[in-house]
Image (cartoon, rainbow, N blue to C red):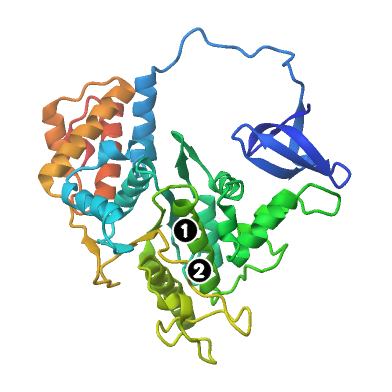
């Protein structure tokens, strides 16, 4: 067995080779199988010639390391995903609404409205963590003007796949593990009518059997939207929203009906960027994708059967279709109920009246509690003492109209206090 090390993916073992050994199929320590070029790795011997030095004691205790990890994230104005529940304050009403919506509501779409810095991203991270614990498949996507804009549905789909997680037997797995479980399940024939899943199952079950069969990595690259190695194609055009909604419907439906999860939850952060485009056609294509996801999550029956005019516009939904196949375009939905839930984080200029959470800025008493929590972790991280008189003075100097700036400012101010112990808070925070 050949052991190798990749500068990005870490250590792994070579499973097979192709193209005369130019590319290696490697199982990395994270469990992911990847094709990489031979010149991208260095070969290792199975036993190291020199034993690595092992310190006799840990430099930081486990508690101190955790506190440092939290503080370094807070320094950027964000909360580490594993600790998001420890840093959620003053949102009990909103959290109850989210839990009710996930578990009971017939509404498939939830919109979180709030000004910049009001905590929308943090609330989405909380939903992500909560949904995984509650047996949902989840993916979170950050929408940007240039990265993953809604008018490029193939990029959004790629990110959904990349960030996809689902719980299974107490552990969290990725998209490929999810698909493998579906393909190998006795219920997989239920996907026969889904043209993309039918082709995927066929390709995965035949890959690697003979010289002429497809390499499994090429199959993954096709279904994950990277390259069009196989047909039916995953088009990289803004009008292909129907194709990606159709595929996501297959994924969300399978999560419930085949694997027994509660469904698929998609979280779109910074979704206000739908309106930040250079051209009108980009806004129209982005809105088309968003509306397709909203209607799919709300199980609108016309998505399955509506008539489409010569301009490829649906008579009932007014959605635009990509003309594949030309005689009968793929619909936005494959099977309903979709078992899909969708959350969008918007600024107040994008209205959705049906199901909405409006985030207000946190009140000062809640911010004081948050600061005390930050100070507690800071003291644990650096073994320093900060008395309550300093924390009160510090609170009076911090910005209170933006939660992210409040968090960043708290850590930066504590750094100044630590580095300049002989100066007063007033001097340091002029």
Q: Could you tell whether 157 is left or right of 376 in the image?
A: right
Residue 232 x %, y % = 67, 69
Give how far across and how far down residue 261 sits, in percent.
Answer: 42, 47
Q: Are marks 1 and 2 in contact (CB under 8 Å)?
A: yes
Which residue extends farthest right?
Answer: 20
Q: Measured from the top left, where is residue 363 in percent x and y?
A: 12, 49
Residue 200 x, y percent position in the rendering? 65, 58
To which quarter of the image does residue 63 belong?
top left
Question: Disc number at residue 196?
Answer: none
Task: Mark 1: give few (<14), some (14-19) or many (20+) Cα within 10 Å.
Answer: many
| Vertical comparison of 54 with 371: above or below | above
Say which quadrant the C terminus sits in: top left
Closest to the observer, 175 or 142:
175
Circle 2 sits on which residue? 334
Q: Is residue 55 visible?
A: yes
Q: Give the residue at the far bottom of this rendering.
A: 310
Tell me the residue that label 1 is attached to: 253
Within 10 Å of the Cα at label 2, are there few (<14), some (14-19), or many (20+) other Cα atoms? many
Q: Residue at x 66, y 69 (%)?
A: 233
Q: Residue at x 66, y 53 (%)?
A: 220
Nearer to us in this view, 331 or 270: 331
In this view, which residue lies farthest toward the top? 56
**Mark 1–mark 2 distance (CA, rounded to whole Å):** 9 Å
- Residue 389 picture quarter: top left
Q: Is residue 91 left or right of residue 64?
A: left
Q: Secondary structure at mark 1?
A: helix
Q: Is residue 310 shown above or below 201?
A: below
In this view, the residue in front, 323 or 422, is 323
């Amino acid at each position: 067995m050949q052991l190798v090390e990749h500068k990005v993916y870490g250590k792994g073992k070579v499973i097979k080779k192709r193209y005369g050994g130019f590319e290696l199929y490697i199982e990395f320590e994270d469990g992911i199988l990847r094709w990489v070029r031979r010149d991208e790795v260095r070969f290792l011997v199975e036993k190291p010639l020199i034993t690595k030095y092992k310190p006799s004691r840990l430099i930081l205790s486990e508690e101190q390391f955790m506190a440092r990890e939290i503080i370094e994230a807070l320094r950027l104005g964000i909360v580490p995903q594993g600790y998001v529940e420890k840093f959620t304050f003053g949102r009990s009403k909103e959290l109850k609404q989210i839990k009710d919506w996930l578990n009971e509501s017939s509404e498939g779409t939830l919109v979180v409205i709030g000004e910049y810095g009001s905590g929308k991203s943090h609330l989405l991270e909380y939903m992500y963590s909560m949904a995984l614990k509650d047996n949902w498949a989840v993916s979170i996507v950050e929408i940007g003007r240039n990265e993953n804009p809604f008018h490029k549905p193939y990029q959004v789909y790629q990110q959904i796949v990349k960030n996809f997680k689902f719980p299974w037997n107490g552990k969290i797995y990725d998209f490929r593990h999810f698909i493998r479980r579906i393909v190998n399940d006795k219920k997989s024939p239920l996907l026969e009518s889904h043209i993309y899943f039918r082709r995927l199952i066929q390709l995965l079950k035949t890959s690697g059997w003979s010289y002429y069969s497809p390499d499994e990595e090429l199959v993954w690259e096709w279904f994950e939207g990277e390259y069009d190695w196989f047909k039916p194609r995953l088009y990289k055009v803004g009008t292909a929203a129907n194709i990606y909604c159709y595929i996501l419907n297959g994924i969300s439906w399978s999560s419930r009906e085949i694997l027994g999860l509660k469904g698929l939850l998609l979280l779109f952060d910074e979704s206000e960027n739908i309106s930040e485009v250079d051209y009108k056609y980009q806004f129209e294509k982005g809105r088309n994708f968003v509306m397709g996801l909203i209607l799919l999550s709300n199980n609108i029956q016309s998505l399955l059967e509506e008539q489409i005019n010569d301009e490829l516009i649906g008579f009932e939904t007014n959605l635009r279709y990509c003309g594949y196949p030309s005689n009968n375009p793929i619909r936005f939905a494959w099977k309903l109920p979709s078992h899909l839930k969708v959350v969008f984080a918007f600024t107040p200029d994008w209205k959705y009246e049906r199901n909405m959470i409006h985030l207000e800025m946190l009140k000062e008493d809640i911010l004081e509690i948050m600061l005390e929590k930050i100070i507690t972790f800071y003291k644990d991280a650096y073994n320093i003492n900060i008395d309550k008189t300093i924390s009160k003075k510090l609170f009076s100097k911090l910005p209170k109209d933006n939660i992210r700036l409040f968090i960043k400012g708290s850590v930066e101010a504590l750094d100044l206090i630590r580095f300049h112990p002989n100066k007063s808070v007033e001097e340091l925070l002029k």
